[in-house]
Amino acid sequence: MDIDMVYLWVDGSDPKWVEKRNACIGKPTDELENCKGRYADNDELKYSLRSVEKYAPWIRKIFIVTDNQVPKWLDTTNPRIRIVDHTEIMPPESLPCFNSTALEHQFHKIPGLSEYFIYGNDDTFINQPVTPETFFCKDNFPIIRLNYKFCRKYFVWFKLNVLGQTINSYARIIHNSALLIEKKFGKYYSGRNHHNIDAFIKSGYVFTRQLFDEELKATLRNHMRSENDIHRHIYPYMALATNCGHLRYVTQRTSFRLPIHKRELYKKLLKYKPILFCMNDSQFSNDDDREYAKAFLSEYFPEKSQFEK
């Protein structure tokens, strides 16, 4: 099978982009939805592409979804690279879009995208040699990787209704997607997004988008991440509900998330040598953390890829 890869990428220091962002949703805050770490570019994409060339050379094409931007170091003449502007996949009422959740619902609109594709943010990396079978089984259905969470639905309900506490917007939007699948198919999936590279089937995307078209319209109208968004995990949940995907719970040896402000986790990453890892920037990170992460990646993936000038 032909398998493509999709990335989201933004350069949050670009003056034109900053002006557009400030006019639409305001300057960055300390909140999860609109923090500096959500838009900071630490050259992760460069090193992620190095990991792809090193460990997954069989990937056919690489689509990079951006907002009228191109990484300065990227060789756009490489036939395997395709820059996809937001205007190509988003409806006019969604623009400008600073909501990655909304963008993720439009991947099936990417021109030329293959039926089978994998998706990762620019801060996700392949860390060992992988094959198509790492992401798709012999029946061509995707492997659905989740973090195991016991009775998450009841935990969320107890926290909200008994303890009177809140949950962060990221947990909320995942919960929203699980509730939609439960309403339609009678099953709530407690497993939570492993925050790493996932596998998808484009026709499954289209079917899910059609089935939940009304529910997803609100997400597409949100210019920044909001609590009423529906997380992209509605697609793997849908695959599981319709017996079109294979569930695999992750461990730290298969999928490792490293919040870059937690320096002690770098040693753990080197110890476990996971198949996939993510270096997650957030509202808790500062510029020193970002410089440290960039230095680590430049040493970890030192060889220039064919995708660089």
Image: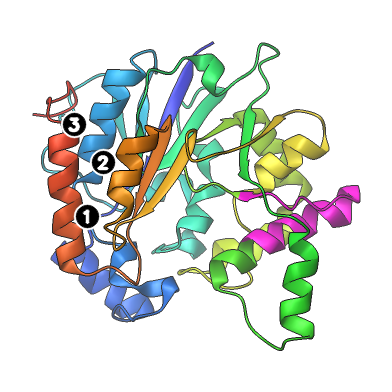
Predominant SS of the magenta segment? helix
* Badge 2 amino acid: Leu
* Badge 1 amino acid: Asp
Horizontal relation, residue 44 to residue 171: left or right? left
Which residue carries the number 1 mark? 41
* Badge 3 amino acid: Phe
Which residue carries the number 2 mark? 45
- Is the residue 57 above or below the residue 282 in the image? above
In 3D space, how far apart are the residues under numbered discs 3 and 1 (Cα atoms)?
17 Å
In 3D space, how far apart are the residues under numbered discs 1 and 2 (Cα atoms)?
8 Å
User: For the view shown, which residue lies furthest in the bottom direction?
Assistant: 164
Who is closer to the viewer here, 202 or 173? 173
Which residue carries the number 3 mark? 301
In 3D space, how far apart are the residues under numbered discs 2 and 3 (Cα atoms)?
12 Å
Q: What is the span of residues highlighted in magenta in the rendered image? A: 174-192
Residue 254, image x and y in percent?
49, 33
Count residues near mark 1 (Cα–Cα under 10 Å), then give few for <14, some for 14-19, many for 20+: many
Horizontal relation, residue 210 to residue 303: left or right? right
* Residue that appears at 31% across and 61% down: 262
Q: Is residue 196 visible?
A: yes
Who is closer to the viewer here, 12 or 66? 12
Closer to the chain start, of discs 2 and 3, is: 2
Label 3 secondary element:
loop
Say which of marks 3 and 1 sits in front.
3
Q: Are marks 1 and 2 in contact (CB under 8 Å)?
A: yes
User: For the view shown, which residue lies furthest in the left direction?
Assistant: 309
Label 2 secondary element:
helix
* Residue that appears at 42% across and 34% down: 276
Count residues near mark 2 (Cα–Cα under 10 Å), then give few for <14, some for 14-19, many for 20+: many
Q: Are marks 3 and 1 in contact (CB under 8 Å)?
A: no
